[in-house]
Image: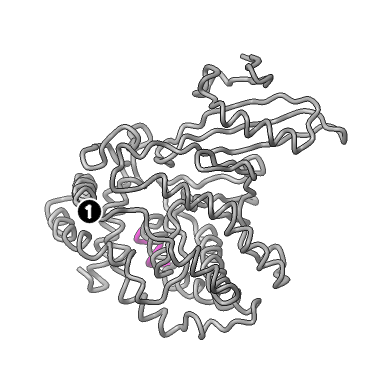
Amino acid sequence: MQVEDKNGFSIKYEKNLEIKKDEDYPLKLKKSVKEIIQKEGFTDNKITVRSIPSDGGNCLAKLFEININGKTKEGNKNMDIFVKQILSDQMLTMFSITDAYIKEVFAYSELLKIYDKLQIEAKIPYEERFKFVKCYEETDREFIILEDISKKGFTTPDRLKPISLDFAKLSIEQIAKFHALSFVLEKKHPDYFNRKVKCQKHCFTFDEEWNKFIDNFCRISMKSLDHEMKKKVENIIPKILEKYPDYHLNTNTLCCLCHGDFRSNNVMMKMNDDLVEEVMLLDFQIIEYSCPLNDLFYFIFSTTDQQFRKDHLEDLKNLYHDTLGDFLMYFDMDVNDYFPRKTFDRLYKERLDFGLLTAVWFLPIVLADHDDAPDFSSQSAAEMNFKTDGSMKGRLEGILHDFIQWGYL
């Protein structure tokens, strides 16, 4: 169906997707798209709007795809835009979605552009840089407007399946570069770093509502386990409530700017035949100044199974630190001055149980059933109940067995 709205937009609504009528396309977003059209020099255009089901992959935003196809003075032109619309904080009281969006707007509109400038000044070859998606200036605290790289062949891995080794390697290289750029920014622009980066705290409020949320999600984790494993998870819950906040809030250790939600669903990949050739990190809503190992453990224990860790964890651990050191060399910085290997190994051992604590409450979100994903916009997190995928039991048991073997349980 194609209609003309009151602002003169020619809009085509796809029958097989969620948008059915004009009011589903917010007026403020229409105005932003109109500004983009004017800046891009369109003389004639048609806009196609699609609302994207989250399918359990995104709990905190309403998503849109917008295609602009038309003519400019130079000829035919086609643009693809991806939009995230903020949702209400109402049902998620211990997590500020407003703060999360402020963080992401800061990341895309300001911080990542500074990182790009630092990489250009250091003359880092394009293929070796930390890469990120283009953000349009029309982005604000309600709509984050990005280039839609899915139309350039980028896809998101299936969150229900363990990741491939090539995807893991490229993703860990990117997070190491992201961390390295934090060290670079702190060295080159300390005043800015102290004002804008060091103040980035975790979005969770660790209060009684958080305690109820954790207890509920741990109970969801336990559903698929046998009696013995259920008892182990029950024994872990007090440790999550006691230790987990400190892992985020205590900055009396080696810290840098972290992604905060580094998992496969927040990394887009481009395939070449059967191998991943490029990845880009997305979703900077939970950036925080904390220990960089938080990101590494979060990624490993939310995206891999036991066999993968047995085969590749040590190599990926080395890859992270090697990449960090190699990337800092572009800026004439020695990794031993910022994150020495001895410090890395010590913190790795001291903080490894962060992966366990995170997995126990977070895996239900990662492995939520496609048809029954949690809806944080309409349900209380402390009371919601949903189904998990059939792989939940094996993934969680594998993590528990690993930590038994490593001496943490």
Observer able to see residue 224: no
Main secondary-structure element of the magenta-colored stretch: helix
Provide the secondary structure element on which disc 1 rests. loop
Q: Quadrant of residue 317?
A: bottom left
The residue that disc 1 covers is 207
The structure residue drawn at horizontal position 56% and vertical position 67%, both measured from the top left corner, is 177
Q: Position of residue 247 (x, y in %)?
A: 31, 66
- Whether 95 is among the magenta residues is no
Give the extent of the magenta segment. 305-311
In this view of the protein, which residue sits in the foreground, 6 or 91? 6
Badge 1 local density, few (<14 within 10 Å), some, or many (20+)?
Answer: few
Q: Quadrant of the C terminus?
A: bottom left
Q: Quadrant of the N terminus?
A: top right
The structure residue drawn at horizontal position 50% and vertical position 35%, both measured from the top left corner, is 63
Residue type at tag 1: Asp
Observer able to see residue 75: yes
Q: Quadrant of residue 140?
A: top right
Image-based side of 73 in relation to 56, left or right: right
Q: Position of residue 19 (x, y in %)?
A: 52, 22
Examine the rendered structure and indicate whether residue 104 appears above or below residue 66: below
